[in-house]
Image (cartoon, rainbow, N blue to C red):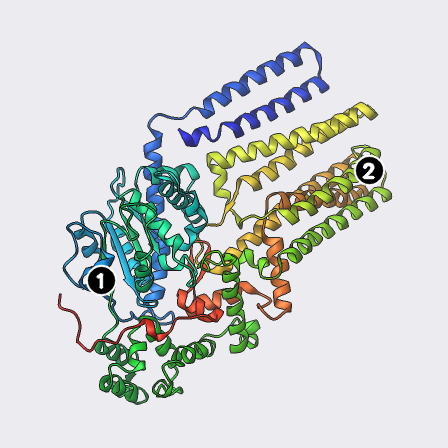
Amino acid sequence: MRRFARHRRPVALASGVLFLALLLTTLVLWGGRDAELAGVVSFGAAVVALLLTSRPPRGAERSEQADAARRLVEAVRDQETRVLDQLLAESGEPRPATDVEFEPAWWKLPELVRHGTDLGGEEGSLRHVAEFYRAGSTGRMVVLGAGGAGKTVLVLTLLRDLVDTLPADLSEPPSRVPVRISASALAPHLDPAEFTTAGAASRRLWDGIAEYLVSTFELSPDGAHALVRRKWILPILDGLDEMDPDTRDPVLAAAVVQALNEQATPVVLTCGEERYKRLARLPASRTGQDRVLRDALAIRLRPLTIDQVVRHIRDRFPDPTAPRVVQRRWEPVLRQLREDPNSPLARALSSPLRLFLAVTVYHDHTRDPVRLIEVGSDELDQHLVDRLVPAMTNRYEGPSDERDEYRPDAVRRWLRTLAEHLGRQSGGREAAPADLHPHTLWISAGRRRMRWRTALFQGLFSTIALAVAAGVLGYDRGYVIPTELLGRLVHLAAIATLPTTVVLSTVLRGKPRRLDLGLLLTRTGTLRALVGAGTGATAGIAVGFLSGLVHEHQLGLAHGLFHGTVLGSVVGIVHGASHEVFLVDRPSRLIVQSRNHYLAVVCTPALALGLLFGPANGLLHESGASAVTGTLLGTSLGTVLGLLGAAASRSPWARYHVAVRELARRGRLPSRLGPFLDWAHTAGLLRMSGAAVQFRHRELQRWMSGTGVTDSEFGPARTGEGLHR
């Protein structure tokens, strides 16, 4: 019912506008009492249509929620399967990495567990995490581990297994849909100073989760809030330790835990072990408050064993002459690991992330991994990171027409720009977010400078279009609508439309949008098209009516009505077929879709007016020259309207385009960002999360920005063969 109620206002507007257009046309062209009768009838028809359209069908709400849940399941499965496959592969190759194993946290960290009965008594690995989770009675679990230990891989595996076991019907809760959410994405919704009343923290958190479903998975706001309210969602909050800067107390993380403890709903958290300990030591703001997740299973990821590391390297680099033997260049490394399992190298390679870096950097048979033994413990991270980009550029070629530009130093500088941009987005108030939105890169190019350059960019094109219109008016004096009136319209556009475009380009910010003609078959798309047609018809009637009153030019009214209706319909179709970009499979598709939407918004009015005004003017005067000048006049005026529409629709593409050109001029980004992001995605340096670009791992993001973790966060590697099941 909420969904249908949301459409009442657009339906009323569309009906009223169409009624006004019909009434004005009837009164001016025919007049008389018949016109009054027609107006009354059309008004009654509009009211009836409004009532019928806005009446919701019975029993639709539950069915719509089930449909939204099913769409969400498919979107989550598609997106997270791609991410998991990429993380489990070595640089994009379909070969699984070493398994990740865990143990119940209460064995060694009892102070971090608040649970009455189900403490968890078995060890496990990726293959057993779903079984371990289902064994708990509350559906609440915390995954602890050092940076790069495999927490995200573990919860992605859990998510995949839970999705695969969901019933196909999904007609009723408690079939919860697991959704992985970067915890830092919820930071804007959490302000501990506002949590003064009971339940305030929980409401803000779940509102943030609902908004995430809207912005990432294309759910309607009402549908997303309904799923959250009726408990259809199992949130998997990834990276609780990444919400606050390392130099501050984890106050935002504490706000999340507070919100989750106010309602004992199922949830999965991942957090760095040391950060979770720090969170547990925070003083409670009130009596009885827990700083850690209450009534939750807690598991702790173990470092890889020496045997796991050796087996993985042997499988990755077998000797061509003896497949069960490792390549000779790796023999000194494996011997060092076996002889000294507590060496800095053994400690580093016990991290799945560092193991990935090592096998990637020394994948090429011309590189000698014995250098890993020679590097000191303090230099090992920097050694791997410094050689990661050269290894990737050597292994993955850039676009054919830009291959020479993808030099290691240039690629490293471009990646550093992206990582620093993420840090700049937070403003120091919270930790750098993981989600990179390319359309926000103008922030890194200079906020004020990019605002005014974008306004200048769009204002310049508007000025050129207005100059063309003025020149055409001076050349040809014969039009369907009197020249004096057209001149006044051009003058009005110059003093009103141009400044409006400049101001809107300066102050408005929006999200990338794309065109999907299939939306016109939906209720919302149809309503938008009707509103556009009605608005255009009204504007056309106004212009034609002025022409008829001033110059007794009744034909101008008919042309104004025709042109306005067609133009409004075309613009309404573009508006009805556009919506935010939610899920993309590669970064460049996000940029291309945003660009195409911007061009459609700008060019559609220009093409519509040019193709309509030119031929009509030529037929009226039986002159080819009049058709040409009419086309030029219509195209130029339509361009002005299109640029105004792009600014009013908050399209971010113009600002993005100006910013990328500026950053490329400084050498901080390539001239064509989309192909570069695709290359980094293929190479395994970046991944997609909805419509956001992320670094493969948060530690990689920190390293690229100049801040990373040290080996001290990792304990000594284990020497056992594995875990007892």
Q: Residue at x 62, y 43 (%)?
A: 648
Hey, what amino acid is under mark 1?
Leu
**Mark 1 secondary-structure assignment:** loop
Q: Position of residue 494 (x, y in %)?
A: 77, 42
Q: Which residue is mark 1?
A: 109
Q: Which sits in the foreground, 189 or 357? A: 189
Q: CA distance from mark 1 to mark 2?
A: 79 Å
Where is residue 459? Give x, y as percent: 72, 50
Q: Contact, CB < 8 Å: mark 1 with mark 2? A: no
Residue 33 falls in image quadrant: top right
Whichever of callouts 1 and 2 sits on the residue coming sooner in the sequence is 1
Identify the secondary structure beneath mark 2: helix
Q: Residue at the location (59% across, 57% down)?
A: 656
Q: Nearer the viewer, residue 316 or 448?
A: 448
Residue appearing at x 45%, y 74% in the figure: 396
Answer few, some or many: residues within 10 Å of disc 1's Cα (few below 14, many 20 plus, some between 14 and 19): some
Q: Is residue 397 left or right of residue 249?
A: right
**Residue ID at (52%, 65%):** 420
Could you say which quadrant of the image residue 287 lies in?
top left
Q: Quadrant of the C terminus?
A: bottom left
Residue 563 image offset from top left, x and y in percent: 69, 34
> Quick one: label 2, few (<14), some, or many (20+) residues within 10 Å?
some
Q: Is residue 85 visible?
A: yes
Circle 2 is placed at which residue position?
487
Q: Amino acid at mark 2?
A: Gly
In the picture provided, is 290 more to the left or to the right than 725?
right
